[in-house]
Image (spheres, helix red, strand yellow):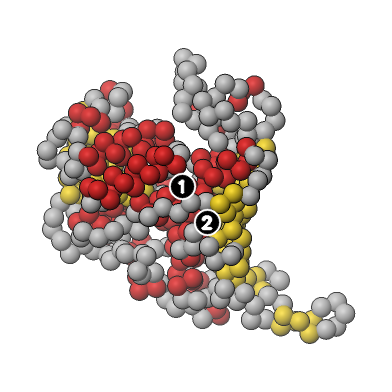
Amino acid sequence: MNQEINRRNFIGTMGIAAAGVACLTPRFAFAGEPASSRKLKIGVVGGGFGRTFHFHEHPNCTVEAVSDLIASRRQRLMKTYQCEKSYESLELLLRDPKIEAVAIFTPAPDHARHVIQTLNAGKHVLCAVPAVMNLDEAHQVLETVKRTGLTYMMAETSTYRHTVMSAKKFFKEGQFGNIFSSYAHYYHPGLEALYFTKDGKPTWRHGLPPMLYPTHATAMIVAVTGERLASVSCIGWGDGDPLLKGNAYGNPFWNETALFKTDKGHPFRAEIWWRGAVIETERGEWHGDKMSYYSGYKGQADHRVVATKNQGTEEGGFAVAKPKMERVPPEHWWNLLPEAMRHETGHGGSHVFITHEFVDSVINGREPEVNIREALAYTVPGIIAHESALKDGELLKIPVFG
């Protein structure tokens, strides 16, 4: 029977420890108010998505300059980040000796090239997802990060959703017991509205295979348990719509559904769908032998936990285990951030956490949580999954990088 309970009762009933940084280390490295007075001078490139982060609010960061190919976007970036300096291209921005790090929010097919350019210019990098588009780029970016010794972080939002951070805590505390299966749903219907510019030219999103943009889903297993996705069988669905014809990827699919096997032998199902009667959402489910956790769909105020500590009887009168589902309000993790950044943002509150994790990792000379090895562990499985879909679901092995 479903039962609504408040967070205090939930914690008492389930025996879950109070939220805290200690529950999430070492993979979760936030530590509240920064101890250093150093200011990281950063450049922000990409005036669309790039305007939704919060570098100007971080006590250890100053936005030194911004860049976009379009003048109006440069102006909006300057206004957002209270910055007086702008450049017409990434190449020009990289010549600025004051800039120590660059946040890259350019089109996905440009990420690998722009990251390599930036690292070779001696700048640390935060880059939007996905990390790469193919295996050759994966090798090239990994080699460049290793050779330069600079900080690389991928700005994956699912890793820093409040729900996923709660799942990390539950996992660290052993509340799940053994996670024997997990799901991730990334539904984004309506993306075809972004396929072409106003003058009819195709954008990088035209026909983008869903599994080449996998990280909002794959992060929900890799970031929580640390497992690597080892093999995959993937099925694609397309309806022959002429809108997909002639895309640069040769992709016939609107939707792709993948069944992965982890290096621990566990199944992980990822659904990445661009079309259909589905609710736009990014959510996960983690199924354990002691407890399971179901994050809500977009717009829902609560989430669900299933616990196995209850007994009951089945229809024939036999005594059996009767796992009980509890509805719980979302847990928030604002206390892990500098005070000025404790507020809602896009993608489930993740943007302020991404901002802080990158700045703090550079300031303190440590690896960010989503470093290059993690970024490729999120990204490469999708590349192989799409290859499987093109081969009618053939089971394929997934290479491990780093």
Quarter of the picture containing the N terminus is: bottom right
The three-letter amino acid code for the residue at tag 1 is: Thr
| Pointer 1 residue | 379
The residue under the point 68% across, 75% down is: 323
- The answer to whether residue 298 is visible is no
Image spot of residue 123 (x, y percent) = 21, 43
The vertical placement of 241 against 101, above or below, is above
Instruction: Give the residue at x 49% y 71%.
Output: 170
Q: Secondary structure at mark 1?
A: helix
| Label 2 CA crowd tier, 10 Å (few <14, some 14–19, many 20+) | many
Q: Earlier in the sequence, mark 2 or mark 1?
A: 2
Q: Is residue 116 above or below residue 12?
A: above
Judging by the rendered image, the residue that carries numbered circle 2 is 229
**Is residue 184 found left or right of 88 in the rendered image?**
right
Quadrant occupied by the C terminus: bottom left
Please provide percent x and percent y for residue 332: 42, 62
**Observer-nearest of 186 and 301:** 186
Which residue is pictured at 52% across the width and 51% down the height? 398
Q: How many marks?
A: 2
Q: Please provide percent x and percent y for residue 245.
A: 60, 22
Q: What amino acid is at disc 2? A: Leu
- 324 and 205: which is toward the camera: 205
Say above or below: 249 vs 364. above
Comparing 147 with 359, the one in front is 147
In which quarter of the view is residue 374 placed? bottom left
Q: Is residue 128 left or right of residue 45?
A: right
Q: Residues within 10 Å of mark 1 (few under 14, many from 20)?
A: many
Residue at 18% in and 42% down: 122
